[in-house]
Image (spheres, rainbow, N blue to C red):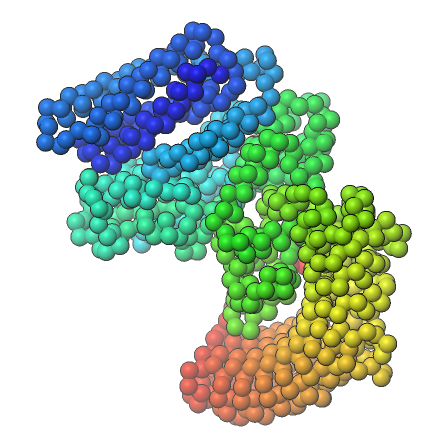
Amino acid sequence: MAITDFFAGEIATELLKQLFMISAKAWKYKSVAERLIDLIENMQPTIKEIQYSGVELPPHRQAQIGMLSNTLEKGKKLTEKVLSARRWNVYRQLTLARKMEKLEKDISNFLKNQILTHILADVHLLRANSDVRFDRVDRSLEMMTEHLGSMKIGGGGMIREAMKIAEATMEIEMGNDEEKFGVGLEIGKRKVKKMMFSAERGLIGISGMGGVGKTTLARELERDVEVQCHFENKVLFLTVSQSPMLEELRAHIWAFVSGYEGVNPVPNWNLQYEGGVKTQKLVILDDVWTREALDALTFNIPGCTTLVVSRSKLTEPKATYDVEVLREDEALSLFCLCAFGQKTIPSGFDKKMVEQVSGECKGLPLALKVTGASLKDRPEMYWKGALQRLQKGEPADETHETRLLHQMEASLENLDSTTRECFLDLGAFPEDRKIPVDVLINMWIEIHDLEEAIAFATLVDLSHKNLLTLGKDPRLGSSYASYYDVFVTQHDVLRDLALHLSNKGKVNIRERLLMPKRESSLPKEWGRNSDEPYRAQIVSIHTGDMDEMGWSDFDMDFPKAEILILNFSSDKYVLPPFITKMSKLRVLVIINNGMSPALLHDFSIFANLSYLRTLWLERVHVPELYNTTVPLKKLHKMSLILCKINNSFDQTGVDISNLFPKLADLTIDHCDDLVSLPSSICGMTSLNSLSITNCPRLSELPKNLSNLQALEILRLYACLELKALPVEICELPQLKYLDISQCVNLSCLPEEIGKLKTLEKIDMRECFFSDRLSSAVSLESLRHVICDKDVAFIWEEVEKAVPGLKIEAAEKCFSLDWLDE
């Protein structure tokens, strides 16, 4: 690379910065400045590709770049004079305006001759002949980012933001964006335009995870003919970035929407603007990172629409379009275009392997482009190695790490330290699996010392920043809502990022010891380092069938482990012996992903888990309890999901309250062998919450239910064979919430329901009651009843008697979609 190449790029950047300032502050030069900005922005990507190509150009090409560099340098000096010129000096203003027009003409003529295009063609030819590798380009980009990342570019952007765009598309020669993204882009354009053209929409948003194509969609909307016509060609596109120059951006937007230039300071535009606007105008704010930045740049001027493009959900849900990943066929076409220069897999190349590598990108455009480009012209054996690394959640190569994971990591920069740690915890769960919200929240409560409400707010924050997808459920977030049947999912590239950041350093010193994918046994690296203690607080294991021999090479010591997650697929499973060395374990999650419940062996190791507070068992046989079973004295919460209960809680002579003296929350969900609730459960007087849900054979509840004097929450929904509630339920002095929804054979509530003086909420959706509840008028604390419309009449008298009572006819919200794994 010649010195002239470097300075041409740098001078162009500096010139752009000054032109933006002129456009914002000096109205006499505004039109010519904006035309110059367009010219320079159009040629900047080409200059940057030449600049960072690593190719030494021949002398005549260097001379041509030198000519451009001289012209830009003159323009830079000219803009400095314009910015320093006094407004009262009319002659000098006129002279400078003519020189600005000459500068525009010189640059325009240079571009008309397509000299840059010819130089770029030479770069490609030279690179092909000398076999210059991609990682050399990436090293140049990384070096330039470090040296220039803090330099501002006009309109609040950063050089690294401009480089990000060039970086993502470098070495990829393709057609228009519709060709790259297929029908998905057209669908997105159609939906956003519908919101945009709606008269009441002043602020709308495009949201999505990094690399999904938000900016591409916004640029397409900027160029769209219908959009241009609707807004009469009055469209302003600005990049805000992570480190915005807000005052400069405000001035630029104010000049655009109001027609007044050089106003300093910009007025408080949150007040209603009275000047009137004759035409519709559109402001597109790309790459907005925070709500504070958005608030500083939005306004209340009639006829103006603002389109916000962000990785976070900063606008109202109804006014936000969430960009989705590409369909499988579109993703493969884009990947092939980047890897082979054509939309299909070349003849003779391993088709299955290409589809697998493309599949690892999960439809994310940036991942497809970067991964495809990094494998371009590589031999098949290199592809196989890259595939294996991708399947382990590792970068395919150095360029893949630099150009994809580093850019994705930018999404975490605005997170506080605790929220960032919560994001990294998501790497502990298997790919392409739904993660129970209840497990996540309990993890965060125990390991990050969060209150439940704060843990839930953290989950919502991560969802709003598109770092996970929170399942839609109308109950979510409401008082007394349950989380064990609500799930989150995460794109594999975001999971790979969590794994990449968690798996740095020697295995013994990592805070999280995670298996990226299911293996037949534990990683050999773990066994080789077992002579030293492991510092991990979270340990996640994902295997198939494990017996004593499978654990024999892994005699590991985890003195700091607080969370253990065991995922497996088998009908039998031996628990790892090293659990006995996890003396500080607080959360144990055991999930069988097989088709039938698994038998667990060696449950005796629980004897050392004196600090265990949360136990989640899924699709296993619940082990029988005996008087010899060591009590779990600190166990606070136990969840049995899709389990075979057998007679676990009904062993003669077993004192359940002694085994679980502090159990406050018991959940039994989708356990189809549960016919009657064992009366021994009513001996656990510490219970605060009892959930027996989706148990289709449960037909009766124990008579001694009133022993649960501390019980506040009782959930019994979707127990289809349950015909009656025992009258003893009315003797629960602390009960606040009763959920009997979808108990379709339940015909009435107990007549003495009015005794429940603390009852605040009843959910009885899809319960077909016909009798009015005479005693219910005494439910003095009741404030919310959810029921079907055709049974709402039974609450009419209660509604009159109890002040502030809300009777809600709710939509159906129950489904078994979560079982479709």
Residue 22: x and y in percent read: 24, 32
Q: Is residue 437 visible?
A: no
Left or right position of 150 against 485? left
The quarter of the displayed image where residue 253 is located: top left
Which residue is at the front of the view, 479 or 775?
A: 479
Screen quadrant of the C terminus: bottom right
Residue 673: x and y in percent read: 78, 72
Residue at 52% from the left image edge and 25% from the top image edge: 140
Residue at 49% from the left image edge and 33% from the top image edge: 146
Residue at 36% from the left image edge and 23% from the top image edge: 11
Instruction: Tell me: residue 42, above or below residue 684.
Output: above
Q: Is residue 136 visible?
A: yes
The quarter of the displayed image where residue 676 is located: bottom right
The number of numbered badges drawn on the structure is: 0
Which residue is the extreme one toward the right?
549
Residue at 75% from the left image edge and 56% from the top image edge: 558
Residue 627: x and y in percent read: 85, 79
The quarter of the displayed image where residue 335 is located: top right
Instruction: Tell me: residue 123, above or below residue 494.
Output: above
Residue 201: x and y in percent read: 33, 52
Left or right position of 735 against 57? right
Left or right position of 291 against 418? left
Instruction: Tell me: residue 788, above or below residue 243.
Output: below
